[in-house]
């Protein structure tokens, strides 16, 4: 029985009599579980994405122990279980191919077991949305422990940021401005401690989105992974999830339309990753909350970029934490009427109550709302005959002079084609051209690779040019930058207009006007469409087959069509 008199879900297992109850309790007692763990107290699942193959989550065994300590203290019974883990820098072809699979693992593991509440341990990019998606489908009382960022990278006397400086270094090597020895030496300087990428990449963005949605306590996102405060935070969450079960505070009471609006505006203010669009739409879909890509453009307008972190700025997550972290941004947005103050959080306090006493300790790192790093940048959603279902550009990471540009298309039919051509000095291209990459979308690659910020041709780099307009159906790493149009939908592999672009066509990009136009007549496009052939799937068996048959386009969050909406957490039928 929970604290509010409601029958606990776990009672169906541990409160059972006869042979079933015996089996459920007896086998767990083989771990030395105290007898009174089965006295009807809340059972808390600790859903752990620990893996040595996910370096960003490699400290989670230790974190899980802290959560357990808190659960015991609060009178709960913790049970840790593993789920699939997705290591961004390691997994091939891309972790995004497996995000939905991990979310299914999370969902089914929760539903199938005697859990009353769940603590989700997630850090690296895709582990965060996968956890939120899976938990949303079950809708138990749930709370996220984010893993925290690594300490600032250090190399040759300066700070370097995860991902962001890798792109810079690799272009420097190709342009002959950095030695290979220095390049290798930078590896250890970049990754100095446990934790996820410490620039405002996708992991830091999704940790911030988790906080903005109210799914982790206010102030948690920026605590460095190795700071002792993160261990205290984990222990407090262990205590809090037991209270949440007793309060019957389910995920759907926290992650509402208002919470998503808060998250979208927060994402604009922190200069967060374009990947957040895809992930938040997918989470909303599981909860039945209406959310469109246009929401990101419309709600983000008028929100200044306040956070001076790479890839948009100078600093890193450790600096953000010392400056006061996300609560400073939240308070500024609230004070300017841009957030829903009464949105609920996992702590039981509203957003407004949570940031009442917050202060900004470094206005270089978190610039004031009225004197921001950049005005009104947000994420721009483009429409036009090249992207009828939308495309995305991140103005804060782009070159202002290229935001309105007309250029000759240079087309790469595949990622491999692009890689082969990049160092070809005979490639017919100059810096005014627009590079177009096909075959990198959700179905095409498959998994929608993070190659949207593909490199500039060597002959262009040698001229000292550092940016060109690039268009693709790919995603982009949250740590990347450039004038890159991403998430073109429908993608080329399903016959979207992108598939019909040819080298020599003229393309117009107008970010202010939110327009992306292929300057080719409708008749000519129809002629090309008639000649277009759908590419054969990369692999036609197993999970990849399931994925290819059911993945939706970027504007629908790349979730599987059969996973939209939740199934709840009704106790499955006994079937022994
Ligand atoms: Fe895991 Fe960047 S590689 S967060």
Image (cartoon, helix red, strand yellow):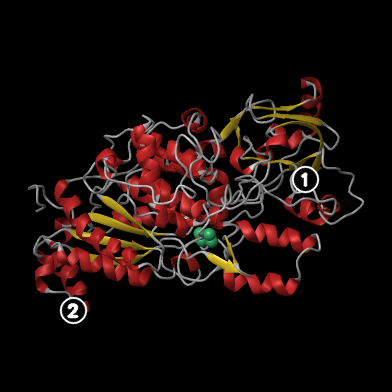
Secondary structure beneath dot 2 equals: loop
State yes or no: Cβ of the residue under disc 2 lies below 8 Å from any atom of ligand 1. Answer: no
Position in image of residue 68 (x %, y %): 24, 67
Q: Which residue is mark 1?
A: 413
Q: Is residue 553 visible to us here?
A: no
Q: CA distance from mark 2 to mark 1?
A: 59 Å
Left or right of 216: which side holds 539?
Answer: right
Q: Identify the residue at image location x=58%, y=71%.
A: 189
Of the 4 image quadrants, the one containing the C terminus is bottom left
SS type, badge 1: loop
Comparing 67 with 110, the one in front is 67
| Residue indicated by mark 2 | 32
Other residues around mark 1 within 10 Å, as few (<14) / some (14–19) / many (≥20)? some
Residue 152 position, x and y percent, is 51, 64
Which residue lies at the image location 39% right of the left edge and 31% below the top edge?
Answer: 338
**Residue 167: image x %, image y %?**
67, 57
Label 2 crowd bin: few (<14), some (14–19), many (20+), radius 10 Å: few
Instruction: Report the residue that reaches farthest toward the right.
Output: 426
The tag on residue 51 is none
- How many tags in the picture? 2
């Amino acid at each position: 029985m929970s604290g509010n008199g409601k029958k606990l879900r776990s009672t169906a297992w541990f409160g059972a009599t006869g042979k079933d109850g015996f089996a459920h309790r007896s086998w767990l007692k083989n771990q030395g579980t105290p007898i009174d763990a089965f006295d009807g107290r809340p059972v808390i699942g600790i859903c752990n994405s620990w893996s040595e193959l996910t370096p960003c989550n490699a400290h989670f065994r230790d974190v899980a122990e802290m959560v357990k300590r808190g659960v015991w203290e609060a009178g709960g019974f913790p049970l840790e279980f593993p789920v699939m883990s997705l290591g961004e820098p390691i997994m091939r072809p891309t972790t995004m191919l497996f995000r939905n699979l991990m979310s299914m693992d999370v969902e089914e593991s929760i539903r199938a077991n005697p859990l009353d509440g769940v603590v989700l341990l997630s850090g690296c990019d895709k582990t965060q949305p996968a956890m939120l998606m899976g938990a949303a489908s079950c809708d138990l009382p749930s709370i996220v422990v984010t893993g925290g960022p690594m300490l600032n990278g250090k190399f040759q006397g300066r700070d370097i940021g995860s991902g962001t400086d890798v792109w810079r270094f690799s272009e420097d090597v190709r342009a002959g401005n950095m030695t290979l020895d220095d390049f290798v030496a930078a590896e250890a300087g970049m990754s100095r401690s446990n934790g996820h990428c410490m620039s405002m990449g996708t992991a830091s963005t999704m940790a911030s989105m988790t906080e903005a949605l109210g799914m982790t306590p206010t102030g948690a996102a920026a605590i460095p992974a190795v700071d002792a405060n993160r261990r205290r935070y984990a222990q407090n969450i262990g205590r809090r999830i037991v209270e949440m079960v007793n309060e019957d505070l389910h995920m759907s009471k926290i992650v509402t339309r208002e919470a998503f609006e808060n998250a979208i505006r927060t994402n604009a203010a922190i200069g967060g990753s374009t990947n957040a669009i895809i992930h938040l739409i997918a989470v909303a879909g599981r909860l039945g909350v209406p959310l469109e890509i246009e929401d990101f453009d419309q709600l983000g307008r008028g929100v200044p970029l306040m956070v001076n972190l790479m890839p948009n700025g100078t600093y890193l997550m450790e600096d953000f934490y010392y400056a006061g972290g996300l609560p400073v941004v939240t308070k500024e947005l609230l004070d300017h009427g841009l957030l829903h103050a009464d949105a609920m959080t996992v702590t039981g306090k509203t957003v407004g109550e949570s940031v009442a006493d917050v202060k900004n300790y470094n206005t270089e790192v978190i610039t004031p709302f009225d004197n921001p790093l950049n005005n009104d940048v947000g994420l721009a959603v483009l429409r036009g005959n090249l992207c009828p279902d939308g495309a995305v550009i991140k103005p804060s990471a782009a070159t202002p002079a290229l935001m309105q540009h007309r250029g000759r298309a240079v087309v790469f039919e595949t990622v491999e084609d692009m890689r082969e051509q990049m160092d070809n000095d005979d490639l017919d291209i100059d810096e005014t051209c627009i590079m177009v990459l096909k075959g990198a979308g959700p179905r095409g690659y498959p998994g929608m690779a993070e190659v949207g910020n593909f490199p500039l041709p060597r002959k262009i780099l040698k001229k000292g040019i550092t940016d060109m307009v690039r268009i693709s159906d790919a995603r982009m790493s949250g740590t990347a930058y450039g004038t890159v149009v991403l998430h073109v939908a429908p993608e080329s592999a399903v016959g979207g207009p992108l598939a019909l672009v040819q080298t020599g066509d003229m393309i117009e990009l107008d970010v202010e006007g939110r327009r992306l136009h292929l300057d080719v007549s409708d008749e000519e496009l129809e002629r090309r469409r008639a000649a277009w052939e759908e590419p054969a799937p990369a692999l036609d068996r197993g999970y990849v087959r399931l994925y290819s048959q059911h993945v939706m386009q970027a504007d629908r969050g790349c979730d599987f069509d059969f996973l939209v909406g939740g199934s709840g957490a009704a106790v499955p039928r006994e079937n022994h």
